[in-house]
Amino acid sequence: MKLLSRVFAICLLMSAASISLAHEGHEHAASLDQAKAVETAGVKIKELIDEGKLTSKWATKAPATAELVRVDGIQNWVVSYMDENMKERLQLIFTTAGEYVSMDQSNV
């Protein structure tokens, strides 16, 4: 009986210790909705232009589409822009939390 009460006491102390070590700051990042994905892409385009990775023409283009796409089991936002005159497409890819993944600029 003494052994059982000691085991119970140890388990109780261990569970109390784990609760006391928990703290705030472990929230998950908020997921992007379509409007926020488009807004985030607009900000990223300006950054890429400032870095010299894109030409300034993309700053004036409105997004053609913003879609939540699943690739290899992972969902990402793909925001696409079109330049009809030059027949080019720009795609910016973001995680659902809003982190920039990559861009793809291609001829259509």
Image: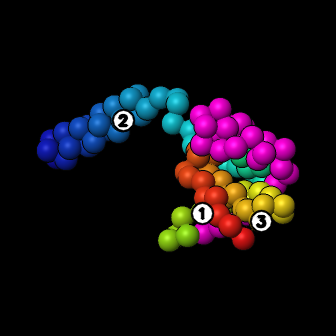
- Res. 30 in view: no
Residue 62 horizontal/vertical position (percent):
85, 51
Residue 58 horizontal/vertical position (percent):
76, 47
Q: Disc 2 versus disc 1: distance between alpha carbons?
A: 33 Å
Looking at the image, is mark 2 or mark 1 nearer the viewer? 1
Residue 106 horizontal/vertical position (percent):
65, 64
Residue 86 location, quadrant: bottom right
Q: Left or right: where does residue 95 sit relative to residue 39? A: left
| Foreground pick, 85 / 100 | 85
Residue at which label 2 appears: 18
Residue at which label 3 appears: 87
CB of mark 2 within 8 Å of CB of mark 3? no
Considering only order in the chain, which callout, 1 or 3, is on the residue closer to the N terminus?
Answer: 1
Q: Residue at x 61, y 58 (%)?
A: 104
Residue at which label 1 appears: 75
Q: Disc 3 versus disc 1: distance between alpha carbons?
A: 27 Å
In the rendered image, the quadrant that contains the C terminus is bottom right
Residue type indicated by callout 2 = Ser
